Image (cartoon, coloured by chain):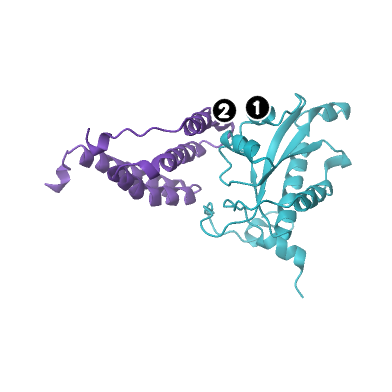
Chain colours: A purple, B cyan
Amino acid sequence: MNENSTNIVLHESEVVELFVYFLATARVQIDDPDYYGPMRLLIAAEKLRDFVSNRSSSSLTRLFELTEPIINDAHIAINDIEKFSNKLDQLSKVIANYLLEVNGIEDPSHD
Amino acid sequence: MTNETLQIIKTRRVVRMMTGEPVARTNIEQILEAARWAPVGGNQRFLRFVVAEDPKLINLIRMVSPGMIQRPQVIITICADWDKFRKNKVKGHDRSSYIDVGTAMQTMLLASHSLELGSGPVTSFNKISVGIMLNLPSHVTPELMVCVGHPASGYQMPMAPKQKITWESLVDWGRVS
């Protein structure tokens, strides 16, 4: 098993918190503004990150470190849809590059 | 000479980072007493206030409240008593009832700030789940929660305004041009 496929087990209380968050938020989101949806997903991602950050591999820790400041900026930009979208675009690039890198696939733009 | 009331109004902020320091019961009672003096439509009292202080209960409420970013020491849930609405022949979802919730909320936020406590309102929560957790009777619904705690310094995760707001930008004098 290489470092990137290390098992990380959530505590049951963490699973409950995340699972309940998704279910409770599904109902809340019907009444909330549509653009809150992406924010709720970011918060869920942060919950997951916070649960495992102290027992994650160096590779996963790096992903968390790369994304955390962008997520923080996205929260602040929630009322400016263009800025908020830009931050989510940034996150999309970071995660794509991360996945390519950890799976040993070179980015063709670097050729 | 500064006007302390206006200073409190102008310096109040939604606090999204709170310490673990408990809030004194006397302070909670002062906040609730302030809410009793908030203006209400027709001087009718349709609101109930349910206070959660037990950390375990607060944690459960947080789990079904995606809008609750802060970790409060106290949650005051403003509830509407629909039996009282019916008894007073007020039409359901009468606008004044929601205004009452807002005035109670703002009064409690200002009272909290005046006591050097941090506070913030939460409307994004699962009403059904919170109603069960607070053991509310079926004719009482949770409408808004006020989180109270000691403000922490540091990152507050503010929502950036879409534009700079001045009071002048919100006001028209006389007939709107």
User: Which residue sits at x=66%, y=62%?
Assistant: B11
State whether residue A100 appears in this view: yes
- A55 vs B49, left or right, is left
**Chain identity of mark 1:** B
B26 shown above or below B40: below
As drawn, the label of residue B26 is: none
**Which residue shows up at 28% across the image and 44% down it?**
A59
Q: Which residue is mark 1?
A: B128
Q: Secondary structure at mark 2?
A: helix
Task: Give me the disc on residue A27.
Answer: 2
Q: Position of residue B51 (x, y in %)?
A: 73, 40
Q: Amino acid at mark 2?
A: Arg
Assign a secondary structure to mark 1.
Answer: helix
Answer left or right for B113 relative to B85: left
For the residues labelled 1 and 2, say whether their Cβ atoms are less than 8 Å apart: yes
Q: How dense is the environment of label 2, judged by Cα within 10 Å: few (below 14), some, or many (20 and up)? A: some
Position of residue B7 relative to residue A27, above or below, is below
In the displayed orientation, state which residue is furthest to the left: A111
Q: Is residue A103 left or right of residue B15?
A: left
Q: Residue at x 22, y 40 (%)?
A: A102
The kind of residue tagged 1 is Ile
Q: Residue furthest bottom?
A: B1
What is the x, y in percent for residue B70? 58, 47
Where residue A28 sits, quadrant-wise, is top right
